[in-house]
Image (tube, rainbow, N blue to C red):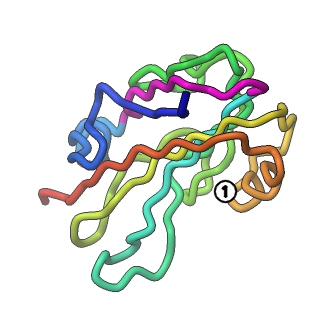
Amino acid sequence: MTLKLTSTSFADGGAIPEQHTCEGDEISPQLAWSGAPPGTKSFALIVDDPDAPDPAAPRMTWVHWVLYDIPADVAEIVEDADPADVPKGCRDGLNDWGRSGYGGPCPPVGRHRYFHKLYALDTLLGDLKYPKKAQLEKAMKGHVLAEAVLMGTYQKKR
């Protein structure tokens, strides 16, 4: 069985609805997964945009959400998951706004791609003190059993 990440909020490769962006209520999308490999002890989630600031001339990857130590028996993050709604035991990292939690798409120009990457890990990572993406990736090194990606797009209307 292969690790698979899906959402009722948007289809893989499809447009992310406005309610999940800075032009809407900026609520996190629903995410669900299946097919975790044997030995999975936790999951980690990174949501990022490699098209920043302009898809025609990208210069950086902008990180929108970092979440880790998602318990192995969890298979969903509900829509509009504020800190009280994420599964018990989850730990937050910092997005590129310098805060924990979800930060929705808000591209300055053009249609950007947003990659929702879920990692099945063979360990719990413990308290990494609000890691940024690079710190989390370093901590995950050698512990990734499987990865699933769900990509959505968004372009500002205003």
Question: For residue 8, what is the image quadrant?
Answer: top left
Question: For residue 133, what is the image quadrant?
Answer: bottom right
**Left or right of 114 on screen, residue 135:** right
Magenta residue check for 32 = yes
Q: Residue at x 40, y 80 (%)?
A: 58
Q: Residue at x 80, y 54 (%)?
A: 141
State whether residue 44 is above or below residue 71: below
Report the front residue among 42 and 23. Answer: 42
Residue 102 in the image: x percent, y percent? 49, 41
State whether residue 140 is above or below residue 58: above
Report the front residue among 7 and 105. Answer: 7
Magenta-drawn segment: 27-41
Magenta residue check for 151 = no
Question: Looking at the figure, which quarter contains the N terminus?
Answer: top right
**Left or right of 43 on screen, residue 123:** right
Q: Residue furthest left?
A: 157
Residue 33 in the image: x percent, y percent? 49, 26
Question: For residue 74, what is the image quadrant?
Answer: top right
Residue 150 in the image: x percent, y percent? 41, 44
Prevailing SS of the magenta stretch: loop
Q: Residue at x 46, y 82 (%)?
A: 59
Badge 1 marks a residue whose secondary structure is helix
Mark 1 — residue? 133
Residue 71 in the image: x percent, y percent? 71, 21
Q: Amino acid at mark 1?
A: Lys
Tag count: 1
Question: Looking at the figure, which quarter contains the C terminus?
Answer: bottom left
Q: Residue furthest bottom?
A: 57
Q: Residue at x 74, y 31 (%)?
A: 69
